[in-house]
Amino acid sequence: MTPRLASRASCLPRRALQSRFTPHAMVAKFGTKKGLEMKGLQKLFHDFADSAQGRLEIAKRVLHFHDKNRDGAISHDELSHLVSATDGQIALGTLDTSSSSTPLVKLVSAA
């Protein structure tokens, strides 16, 4: 792989983390009536891991962190604090708290 191609490839995960969805669109595409469940989260983060095991780990981490009532799904209410006041959407990077992206909210609240 050429250095230029390698550089482009390294940007892809960061760019994907910036993918944005409205809560309704995210649940409609990847969830069920209950909300975002394990299977849907694995589909949502498909491009972030090379293996099914990697996608499962991401999905477990996201579900554990955001499923406050522990019913096995992230509901619209549980997604509401992730919605940007600017455009009403959620960036994938804010769902996976261990990703390399740092949401602006974290930067502002840390100041």
Image: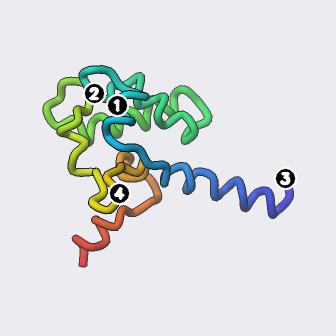
Check whether the beta carbons of the residues at disc 1 and disc 2 lie within 8 A of each other: yes
State the separation of the CA atoms marked 2 and 3.
40 Å
Q: Position of residue 72 (x, y in %)?
A: 24, 24
Q: What amino acid is found at the position of numbered circle 4 in the picture?
A: Asp
Residue, x 54% and y 49% (percent of image)? Answer: 16
Q: Secondary structure at mark 1?
A: helix
Q: Which residue is mark 3?
A: 1
| Residue on which disc 2 sits | 35
Q: Earlier in the sequence, mark 4 or mark 3?
A: 3
First-in-chain label (2 vs 3): 3
Mark 2 residue type: Gly
Tell me, yes or no, if residue 98 can be seen here.
no
State the residue at coordinates (36%, 49%): 90
Q: Could you tell me which residue is drawn at 49 percent across and 49 percent down?
A: 19
Seen from the viewer's position, the closer of residues 37 and 33 is 33
- As measured in the structure, the alpha-carbon distance from the residue carrying label 1 to the one carrying label 4 is 17 Å
Nearer to us of marks 1 and 4 is 4
Q: Secondary structure at mark 3?
A: loop
